[in-house]
Image: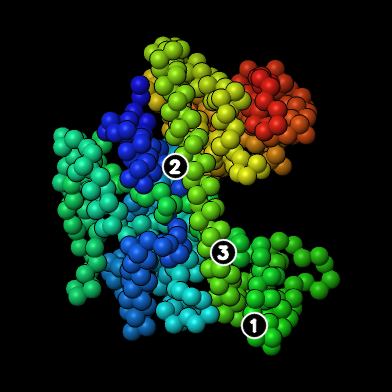
Amino acid sequence: MADIYFTDFFNVPEETLSTYGAFNIALDIDLPLFIDPFLLFASENEDYKKLHDGIIEYLLFLRERSLEGHVSKAMLQAWYFFPEVKENCFGFCIDGHSGRGLAGNFAKALNSGFEDIFKSFGEETITKGHHLEKLCLIKDRVGRDTISDFTTNLIKDYLLLYTEAFAKEHIPADKCSSISVPKSIFNYQFKRWMPKSYLLPIYKGKHLILTPIDMLTKDDTWINKKDLWNKFESIPDAIPNGQLRELVNDYFYSQLPKDDKPTKEDREKAISRTLRQFPDTIDYFIKLKEAGRKEAFDNSKLKVGNSNEVYINLVNKLVQLLSTTSKFYDIPPQNSEEETAKRIEFLKDVIENKGGHKLFYIKGKPVKRESDLQIAFRLTWVEASSDITREADDGRGPVDFKITNGAKDKVLVEFKLASNSALKRNLENQTAIYEKASDAKISFKVIMYFTDEELVKLQRVLRELGLTNDKYVYLIDARNDNKPSGSKA
């Protein structure tokens, strides 16, 4: 049976890792989970509270250096630049664990933040605490992955010690090694990051890092820009100062077009200007989020539990079933086309007949993301004779996957949602572009639908494009109320 997860390779019972409280990471693919600093701040765990205090202490150190004057390029690199902690196997990267890390854009955004949005950082009186996530509410190119990467780097010593303790007790010595990990702890006396050695589990010559489940969330951090934008009109109601409340409201509506109906872009610009004019509004938003701490934990538990159920439990059971009964991994396909078709059909069966559709629902409502479908597909691609890679973005958008079995044997796979308003245009135009760029002759198109209405629309689009009987087009039925056997288009 293939080694997909941490417990597979290190021969650790899943119950042991679960009891320890760690997430069972996938070894060769990132899962879209993130460390949310708010979960540290709001936790009843005193160790987590200290970790959050440590994050704030480091931010205050950076703020003091910024207020002292110009921060040189060398200082930016020493204090703000961090590699992606790819050893924890979380993030956006579906093909392996190679991410961007934190460099120039993040350093400039955070450093400049101390001149505006973080100007009074550490001195807030409206909120109960101080929050790194404040940065992502205003600055461009600072999102959940950036906040999570920064948080992970700042608590890396804790995570490494957490992993070391598990390794010493449960993993054979021949699968561990003493590793000096750079930038593990910060020495405030010398104002520099220092390395530290740990005994860690090793996979393919690299160490791994375990993460406690109760630090993790999926989709976004609790304090995030999307919620700020969506709930902005309700924030002034939380401002106790009546005069300030009216000033914020008046200024916001004055920034919207007078005659025409405001567009989404108009509204976002008006919000951005209002936040800069009245920065305390951000703190009132954060105060509302602080009040929802129980919901934050419930939300995290639901989403991470959902990911654990489908990405790990369900896929593991199916891989085991296929390995022991149908010999799914033992019969080598003749070429990449045959192997790709086999994997797609397996994924289709998982979603339609084995409960895999649950991955795409939260509280009974569909969460429509192509990325989840891509991850589910990638998790089925183990012990394969062909290579699967993410295609580089050449400016025309990256194809989801390229499958190769030799220089001349290449196929492409694209995943779509039937609800996508640009579905017809994408099906009509993208295939030829991708095939030309990748020197491939075959493109599989996998389209998932959630409702009867989406199926009707999808069938109409396929008829109009002459793809109804195309053997390279697969439909996947993710309806929650009816699970008939789907069929190829």
- Where is residue 326 drawn, in percent x and y? 46, 12
Q: Which of marks 2 and 1 is in front?
A: 1
Location of residue 314 with respect to 127 vertically, above or below? above
Q: Judge depth for marks 2 and 3 and give the one in front.
A: 3
Q: What residue type is labelled 3?
A: Gly
Q: Residue 292 carries which label?
A: 3
Q: Which amino acid does label 1 sit on?
A: Pro
- Identified at 66% across, 69% down, the residue is 232
x then y, percent, for residue 396:
56, 42
* Residue 236, quarter of the rendered image: bottom right
Q: Decide: few, some or many residues near mark 1? Use Cα within 10 Å; few <14, some 14-19, many ≥20.
A: few
* Alpha carbon distance from label 2 to label 1: 42 Å
Q: Residues within 10 Å of mark 3 (few under 14, many from 20)?
A: some
Whichever of labels 2 and 1 marks the residue nearer the N terminus, that label is 2
Question: Dot 3: what SS?
Answer: loop
At 74% across and 78% down in the image, what residue appears?
Answer: 254
Q: Nearer the viewer, residue 303 or 147?
A: 303
Looking at the picture, how far across and down is residue 357, in whole percent? Answer: 60, 32
Q: Can you tell which mark lies on residue 31? A: 2
Decide if residue 427 is on the left or right side of residue 147.
right
* Residue 183 locus on image (x, y percent): 25, 59
Q: Would you say residue 350 is visible in this rendering?
A: yes
Closer-to-camera residue (343/22): 22
Q: Which residue lies furthest to the bottom in this view?
A: 243
Q: In which quarter of the image is residue 249?
A: bottom right
Task: Give left or right: position of 370 versus 380.
Answer: right
- Which one is in front, 397 or 368? 368
Please determine whether, in this image, residue 143 is positioned above or below residue 453: below
The residue beneath circle 1 is 240
